[in-house]
Image (spheres, rainbow, N blue to C red):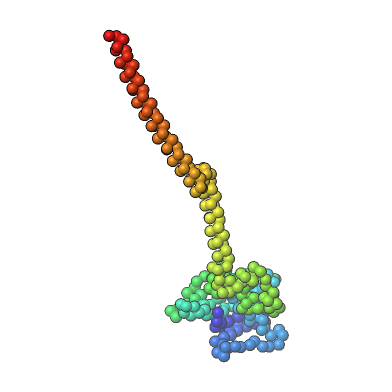
Amino acid sequence: MKPITLRLSGLQSYREAQEIDFTELCETGLFGIFGPTGSGKSTVLDAITLAMYGKVERAYGGTQGIMNHSEDTLYVAFTFELESAAGVRRFRVERRFKRTGEVSVSNTLSRFIEVKPEGDEVVADKLAEVTKAVEERIGLKMDDFTRAVVLPQGKFAEFLSLKGSDRRQMLQRLFHLEQYGDRLVQKLSKRARETESALRTLEAEQQGLGLASAEAVKDAKAALDAAGLAAEARRAELDAAAEEHGRLARVRERAGERRET
């Protein structure tokens, strides 16, 4: 993400409208923000975070307390560029807040805009949808953004101390490795569950068929062959018995004929 411009007004010490042109600052590749305590250095970073995600971590309730006490409205607009294989694309995030009570602030404008040569295109214009559009374009949630891109005061130690799943998930989002991390685990878990289910189905079918191992099939074939041989022997005995029965019947018939004569 390359910053282009930042406009803000009514935010902390920046009561009047201010604009920062980062294109001039980035010409040398590196720049610093310097000034005495309370001069508004951190507020510049707060303005970027507020524009991107609609809240500031160090502010009470995310927004209350970040508005200048003498103003009733707060406005931020941050323009940045993203570079990918498809080329460079420029976006602008705008948000406006209004004081609604002594300590309460409400959002009255949220827009995520793609800046194109032919004209601006509003991609999202609702609070939650704008934040979602930002997360989808840069691939970072607010926690990741404030840990790896804009580190609030006192948060660098927290970034270094991230452990376990927090570190893994943040690195996945930073380098777009979700398909090799949690998504891969989910895919493998699903495949394992499907395989286990198929195995249980096959085991149930096998139990219904009885013993059907290769050895059992071999033994059954041998028993079938033996039964076939035994059946052939019985058929031969039956044929011999039938032939003997026929011979004896003929002998008895002749003996009867002699008695009659």
Residue at (51%, 47%) from the top-left corner? 215
Residue at (30%, 15%) from the top-left corner? 254
Is residue 109 visible in this depiction of the protein?
no
Q: Position of residue 191 (x, y in %)?
A: 53, 58
Residue at (60%, 80%) from the top-left corner? 8
Q: Is the residue 79 above or below the residue 31 in the image?
A: above
- The residue closer to the viewer here, 253 or 68, is 253
Q: Position of residue 241 (x, y in %)?
A: 38, 26
Is residue 51 visible in this depiction of the protein?
yes
Query: What quarter of the picture does the N terminus occupy?
Result: bottom right
> In the picture, residue 145 is in which quadrant?
bottom right
- The residue closer to the viewer here, 188 or 209, is 209
- The residue closer to the viewer here, 197 or 129, is 197
Query: What quarter of the picture does the C terminus occupy?
Result: top left
**Left or right of residue 153: residue 76:** left
Residue lying furthest left: 261
Q: Is the residue 221 above or below the residue 76 in the image?
A: above
Residue lying furthest bottom: 28
> In the picture, residue 99 is in which quadrant?
bottom right
**Left or right of residue 91: residue 161:** right
- The residue closer to the viewer here, 73 or 95, is 95
Residue at (49%, 73%) from the top-left corner? 122
**Left or right of residue 222: residue 165:** right
Looking at the image, how many numbered discs can be counted on the residues? 0
Q: Is the residue 248 above or below the residue 49 in the image?
A: above
Q: Position of residue 53 (x, y in %)?
A: 60, 72
